[in-house]
Amino acid sequence: MAPLPKQKTPKGAKGARRSHHRAQIRKLSECSHCHSARLPHTVCPTCGYYKGREAVIIGEPELPE
């Protein structure tokens, strides 16, 4: 049988334990090519560059004929 707590945990103790469980603000970095805000370690959604080179071609999708 598993051990059980002897007393009920107070609301303040639960709140203090959960004080760091909030949502974090996402950190943004500047694109070296177009200087727009983007998430770090990801391809820029505006220009498609990553680490100074073009990783993804951004443009209008080609329609099949």
Image (spheres, helix red, strand yellow):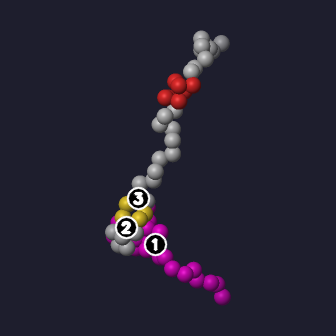
Amino acid on which the number 3 mark rests in the picture: Leu
**In this figure, which residue is indicated by the disc labeled 3?**
28
Give me the residue at 43% from left, 74% from top: 47
- What SS does tag 2 mark? loop
**Quadrant location of the C terminus in the rendered image:** bottom right
Which quadrant would residue 5 be assigned to in this image?
A: top right
Visible residue check, residue 30: yes
Q: Which mark, residue 16?
A: none
Q: Which mark, residue 31?
A: 2
Give me the residue at 37% from left, 67% from top: 31
**In this figure, which residue is indicated by the disc labeled 1?**
46
Q: CA distance from mark 1 to mark 2?
A: 9 Å
Question: Do callouts 1 and 2 mark residues in contact (Cβ within 8 Å)?
Answer: yes
Give me the residue at 41% from left, 65% from top: 37
Q: CA distance from mark 3 to mark 2?
A: 10 Å
Which quadrant would residue 60 be assigned to in this image?
A: bottom right
The range drawn in magenta is: 42-65
Give me the residue at 46% from left, 51% from top: 25
